[in-house]
Amino acid sequence: MDEKTVQIAMEIILHAGDARVSCKEALDALASANMDLATEKIKDAQTKITLAHKVQTDAIQAETSGEKSEYSLLFAHAQDTLMTIYSEINIAKQMIKILSSYEKRLAALENKLENS
């Protein structure tokens, strides 16, 4: 495996790993009902996973443009990592939306009870 492939794979893994950390922090904030922090952390996770995706896309485009590359288990692992964490972020985003919706409904019900 050439050094460039190793560097690309490690960059994908690094950015995706950073995204996973931010996603976990978003879920921790969500568990504490800190919606502002959860939203901030999931945006950070999205930014980081986008960096990883760009590195992957650039590598794929280089290969489709004729640049030679050999199969790399490390690059395959990087792609798996990227897609797994991308899925985690998407699920966390949905969880934030769901909890936000419940929080709004609960606040409306509490308000209604207070005004009764």
Image (cartoon, grey):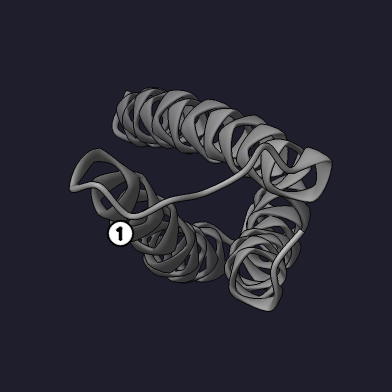
Label 1 sits on a secondary structure element that is helix
Residue wearing tag 1? 58
Q: Which residue is drawn at 41% across and 63% down?
A: 55
Query: What amino acid is found at the position of numbered circle 1 in the picture?
Result: Asp
Horizontal and vertical percent position of residue 12? 59, 62
Q: Quadrant of residue 114?
A: top left
Q: Residue at x 57, y 68 (%)?
A: 8
Horizontal and vertical percent position of residue 71? 67, 37
Q: Which residue is drawn at 72% across and 68% down?
A: 6
Horizontal side, residue 34 vs residue 104: left or right? right
Horizontal and vertical percent position of residue 87? 57, 28
Q: In which quarter of the image is residue 59?
A: bottom left
74, 50: nearer the viewer: 74
Where 25 sits versus 108, above or below?
A: below
112, 2: nearer the viewer: 2
Q: Residues within 10 Å of mark 1 (few under 14, many from 20)?
A: few
Horizontal side, residue 14 vs residue 97: left or right? right
Q: How many marks?
A: 1
37, 72: nearer the viewer: 72
Horizontal and vertical percent position of residue 3? 70, 76
Q: Residue at x 18, y 48 (%)?
A: 65
